[in-house]
């Protein structure tokens, strides 16, 4: 091999390397400008300080209270958005909730509205929420070892729910709402948690819909389904595991908003664990729950990322030919 050929190959390698570094740097700049991995935490409940409390303990203003909280056993605080009035019925006046912040305290231009009429209800501490508040002798607090940063009693201890024992059928029987103000160029990952202490088996099915769909289910209630013990409240007759979900969080990834920036969440309850992923019009026959929700915005691969991938492939081909 001549010295000139070696020199040409070395120059070519340098050019490819510098192009790749430049494109990677540009991609980082663009990703940072789109708010990479922005995460928003939502707490749902009946916020009357009897059956449930906001993240701060203060009564909500226009149905929303925003504040910082630290999980039991943790040392790091995160910002939560508590949503819900002090009444059982969460659709009175057809509210739209806004003024949210992400978990780091930055403002978020999202809103939650179009709440399913009649079926979206709320309860909590006095009715089996995962918290030691209230008067039930079966109550207990969430555990950091099981739930991590989400182990906040005011978050897990109250919930929105739907009662599908009323004989309701089809999509009209769902609880749920629509998140607006999302970025259509991003994909979103949802983490959903539902829990209610009860010995009967209850499963909540969650349906997400934007320009595509996502689905998953959780067992929220049932005898000894918990990962932790039943609790140590004086007078608790249960010596087994907790009769509710105290550890499992459902993750649904890759949900894209509509062109208008909307994703809708609907949920309902059944008594069996059969998947309903292919049957969005199925009927519920039990209770369904939503205690908290985490939404994370995930940037789609940019044109620069795709160009970088192409350059890598071209460089590899060039190296083989050399």
Image: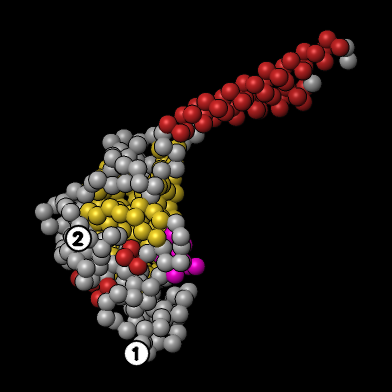
Q: Tell me the residue at 64%/21% (across/down).
A: 18
Q: Residue furthest left?
A: 93
Q: Which mark is residue 49?
A: none
Q: Say whether residue 151 is left or right of residue 110.
A: right
Identify the image quadrant of residue 202: bottom left
Is 297 in front, or is 222?
A: 297
Q: Residue furthest front?
A: 75
Image x and y of residue 264, in percent: 29, 49
Image x and y of residue 93, in percent: 11, 54
Is 305 in front, or is 255?
A: 305
Give the extent of the magenta segment: 143-151
Question: In which quadrant will I find the C terminus?
Answer: top right
Q: Residue furthest right?
A: 1
Q: Which residue is mark 2?
A: 59
The local secondary structure at tag 2 comes to loop
Q: Which mark lies nearer to you, 2 or 1?
A: 2
Q: Tell me the residue at 40%/87% (across/down).
A: 238
Q: Tell me the residue at 27%/77% (across/down).
A: 134
Q: Which residue is mark 1?
A: 235
Is 66 in front, or is 261?
A: 66
Q: Say whether residue 36 is left or right of residue 60.
A: right
The local secondary structure at tag 1 comes to loop
Question: In which quadrant will I find the N terminus?
Answer: top right
Q: Say whether residue 118 is left or right of residue 31.
A: left
CA–CA distance in space, label 2 to label 1 = 31 Å
Q: Give the vertical position of 169 relative to 141 (above or below).
A: above
User: What secondary structure is the stretch in magenta mostly built from?
Assistant: helix
- Of mark 2 and mark 1, the one earlier in the sequence is 2
């Amino acid at each position: 091999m001549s010295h000139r050929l070696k020199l040409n190959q070395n120059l070519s390698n340098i050019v490819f390397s510098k192009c790749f570094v430049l494109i990677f740097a540009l991609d980082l700049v663009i990703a940072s400008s789109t708010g990479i991995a922005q995460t928003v935490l939502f707490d749902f409940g009946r916020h009357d300080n009897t059956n449930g409390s906001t993240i701060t303990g203060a009564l909500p203003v226009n149905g929303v209270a925003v504040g910082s909280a630290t999980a039991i056993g943790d040392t790091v605080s995160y910002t939560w958005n508590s949503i819900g009035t002090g009444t059982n019925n969460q659709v009175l006046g057809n509210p739209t909730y806004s003024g949210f912040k992400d978990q780091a305290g930055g403002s978020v231009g999202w809103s939650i509205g179009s709440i399913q009429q009649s079926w979206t209800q709320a309860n909590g501490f006095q009715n089996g929420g995962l918290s030691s508040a209230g008067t039930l002798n079966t109550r207990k607090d969430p555990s950091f070892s099981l739930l991590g940063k989400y182990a906040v009693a005011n978050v897990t201890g109250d919930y929105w729910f739907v009662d599908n024992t009323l004989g309701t059928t089809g999509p009209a029987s769902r609880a749920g709402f629509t998140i607006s103000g999302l970025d259509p160029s991003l994909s979103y990952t949802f983490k959903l948690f539902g829990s209610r202490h009860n010995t009967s088996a209850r499963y909540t099915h969650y349906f997400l819909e934007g320009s595509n769909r996502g689905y998953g289910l959780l067992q929220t209630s049932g005898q000894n389904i918990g990962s932790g013990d039943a609790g140590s409240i004086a007078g608790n007759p249960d010596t087994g595991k907790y009769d509710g979900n105290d550890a499992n969080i459902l993750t649904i990834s890759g949900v894209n908003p509509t062109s208008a920036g909307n994703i809708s969440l609907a949920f309902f309850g059944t008594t069996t664990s059969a998947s309903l992923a292919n049957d969005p019009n199925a009927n519920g026959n039990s209770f369904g729950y939503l205690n908290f929700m985490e939404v994370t915005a995930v940037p789609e691969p940019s044109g620069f990322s795709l160009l970088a991938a192409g350059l890598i492939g071209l460089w590899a081909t060039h190296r083989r030919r050399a």
